[in-house]
Image (cartoon, rainbow, N blue to C red):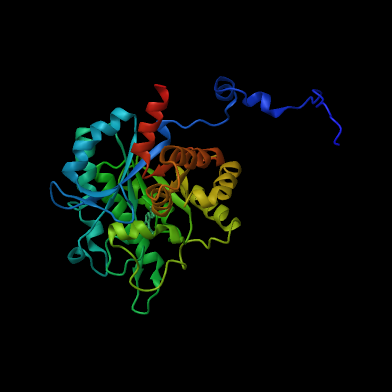
Amino acid sequence: MMSETKPSPHLPVRLRRNRRNEGIRSLLRETELSVTDFVYPVFVAEGAGREEPIPSMPGISRKSIDLWLEEIPELLNLGLKAIAPFPVVPEEKKDKRASEALNPQGLIPQFTREVKKHFPQMIVMTDIALDPFNTDGHDGLVSDTGEILNDETVELLCRMALCHAEAGADFVCPSDMMDGRIGRIRSSLDDAAYTGTGIIAYSAKYASAFYGPFRDALQSAPKAGDKKTYQIDPASRREALREVESDIGEGADVVMVKPAGAYLDIIRDVSHTFNIPVCAYQVSGEYAMIAAAVGNGWLARGPAILESLLCIKRAGARFIWTYFAKEAALLLKNQEHR
Ligand code: PBG
């Protein structure tokens, strides 16, 4: 027979004491999500009254400018502060030199002007890179031999940034990973007296498989090759710090780590190493993974969304670009009323 043993109550450290009810947990909680943590990336299409769902991003659509303008009051009411438009450029407007990127009547300048005219309080963050506009689907110009041309690309990016600044963008956000673009864009903006237009630098942008659904959404996948000669190797950490350091030196106002969920160590390193605001981009593939698992009944939607975002913030991101922005804002609002 087994002898009866009575458990001893003496155990000075009992960490569960701090978790015993929601009131205590909420007092001791170290990180809290708020609606001001989110930037909403949106896909902007030509035409009017147009809405096209994106199969690899269930719940997300490409929409024409008029539909986005109708939706913005709802976004502002939820407390969202920032929107980041990405253009769906029709194939016939793409060319080798990405000319459409410089068109002041193009989708992004038009979207920006309209949003700032009707909702000046909404912060507009525009993407600076050539991939939605050139026939090659690369962030830079491609030479006859298939090389991505750095300095020639940077010249175009400067003109593109000016075009967005003129339209009223609050921040231009170079996502191209060409060398030296932050400094050149800063001085182009300053030369034109856009000293108040900010730069969010996609500094630690990795060559990631998780951008797949975004490239479906914009039909912008590279026609040949991959982006490994300009985006960072996922195996490297110190290189990301070097990228951030140089972008800060060149005048970035905010730096970004992208993707987010699989790169929490990079977010943490960057936020601990530098005194600059850090944001992170929960990319299309991260959205797709959660949406697919939820769609199959394998994950609980709300909790999975909020946990994925909370952990990115805990790692050190001050704000997060996420396709869940609107839904997460709603989830937080409903939590308040419980
Ligand atoms: C384009 C750009 C990309 C993303 C943002 N800007 C794609 C890429 O670099 O291939 C990806 C965003 C996402 O996957 O949600 N320079």
Q: Quadrant of residue 55?
A: bottom left
Q: Quadrant of the N terminus?
A: top right
User: Is residue 97 left or right of 185 when viewed as pictured?
Assistant: left
Q: Residue furthest left?
A: 48
Q: Position of residue 49 (x, y in %)?
A: 13, 46
Q: Residue furthest bottom?
A: 145
User: Is residue 126 left or right of 201 when viewed as pictured?
Assistant: left
Q: Residue furthest front?
A: 1
Q: Does the rendering let one see residue 120? A: no
Q: Does the rendering let one see residue 200? A: yes
Which is nearer the eye, 175 or 234?
A: 234
Residue beneath the point at 35% across and 71% down: 142
Which is nearer the eye, 244 or 88?
A: 88
Q: Quadrant of the C terminus?
A: top left
Q: Residue furthest top?
A: 23
Residue beneath the point at 40% across and 58% down: 211
Residue beneath the point at 40% across and 38% down: 38
Q: Position of residue 229 (x, y in %)?
A: 46, 68
Which is nearer the eye, 279 or 66?
A: 66
Q: Position of residue 331 (x, y in %)?
A: 39, 32
Q: Position of residue 166 (x, y in %)?
A: 25, 45
Which is nearer the eye, 51 or 111?
A: 51
User: Is residue 56 left or right of 277 when viewed as pictured?
Assistant: left
Residue beneath the point at 37% across and 39% down: 325
Q: Quadrant of residue 240?
A: bottom right
